């Protein structure tokens, strides 16, 4: 399987807390991307990390990538109720030319 | 607003109907994609077009028929669907397949399809 697998499947936290989601994959990749989806809507690209990068930041988002363990994590700091959504990792496997998405982590931020 | 629009947003159809989903992108991209999203399943890639040529057909049943008349428009023609085809159908676009390793995709809002 070329798709990533997110963990946990669901996460519920209080507003202001940090949220961490993990993604594991099995193939070599060009890059790994994180997307967000609000209920019943399309996916929105959040951040892309290349295979030669280890960490990347964008606002309150911090993504890490460990290619030796074939895993990535997405950290959302100081969460807000508006962060409630599903978060997907997508792998861009070497030579595949397509993205492969997992089943996502459903994050609920309680006000 | 991602620059990718889809119509209709909701569609209810019977198993004998014929309908079409439309996707349009205003981003100047050359690759377009159809995905199917069902509850508790990974996003399923259905079709890929690169410069109007179909490059991927992911073993999709023939009751789904894609059409890409130009790089900005993508259609999914539906006929004699089954209830299990009920799902959210997402369209996406990206700059170009195979040219770079970035392949960031921009998604439309989706069409929620219900087959009765």
Image (cartoon, coloured by chain):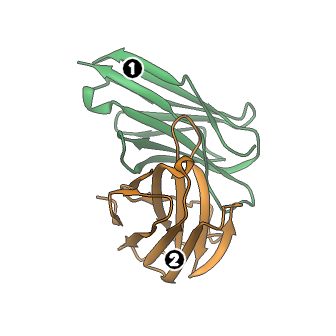
Q: Residues within 10 Å of mark 1 (few under 14, many from 20)?
A: some
At 68% across and 66% down in the image, what residue appears? B57
**Badge 2: chain ID:** B
Tell us which disc is closer to us: 2 or 1. 2
Question: Any idea which chain is the orange one in this picture?
Answer: B
Closer to the camera in the image, A71 or B12:
B12
Relative to A21, say whether B94 is above or below. below
**Secondary structure found at label 2:** loop
Please tell me the numbered disc located at residue A111: none
Residue that sits furthest to the bottom in the current view: B69
The residue at 59%/76% (across/down) is: B50
x and y, in percent, of residue B108 in the image: 39, 59
To which residue does mark 2 refer? B30
Give neighbour class at mark 2: few <14, some 14-19, many 20+ (Cα, 10 Å). some
Decide: is B79 above or below A70: below
Q: Which label is found at residue A18?
A: 1
Residue A52, x across and y down, in percent: 66, 47
């Amino acid at each position: 399987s070329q798709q990533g697998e997110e963990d946990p499947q669901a996460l519920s936290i209080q507003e202001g807390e940090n949220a961490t989601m993990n993604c594991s994959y099995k193939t070599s990749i060009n890059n790994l991307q994180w997307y967000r989806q609000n209920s019943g809507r399309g996916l929105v690209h959040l951040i892309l990390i290349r295979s030669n990068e280890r960490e990347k930041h964008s606002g309150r988002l911090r993504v890490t990538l460990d290619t030796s363990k074939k895993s990535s994590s997405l950290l959302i700091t100081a969460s807000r109720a508006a962060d409630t959504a599903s978060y997907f990792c997508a792998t861009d496997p070497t030579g595949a030319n397509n993205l492969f998405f997992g089943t996502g982590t459903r994050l609920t931020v309680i006000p | 607003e991602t620059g990718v629009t889809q119509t209709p947003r909701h569609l209810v159809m019977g198993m004998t109907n014929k309908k079409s989903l439309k996707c349009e992108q205003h981003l100047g991209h050359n690759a377009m994609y159809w995905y199917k999203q069902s509850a508790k399943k990974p996003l399923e890639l259905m079709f890929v077009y690169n410069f109007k040529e179909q490059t991927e057909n992911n073993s999709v049943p023939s009751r789904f028929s894609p059409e890409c008349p130009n790089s900005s428009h993508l259609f999914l023609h539906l006929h004699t669907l089954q209830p299990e085809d009920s799902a959210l159908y997402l369209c996406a676009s990206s700059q170009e397949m195979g040219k770079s390793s970035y392949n960031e995709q921009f998604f439309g809002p989706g069409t929620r399809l219900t087959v009765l």
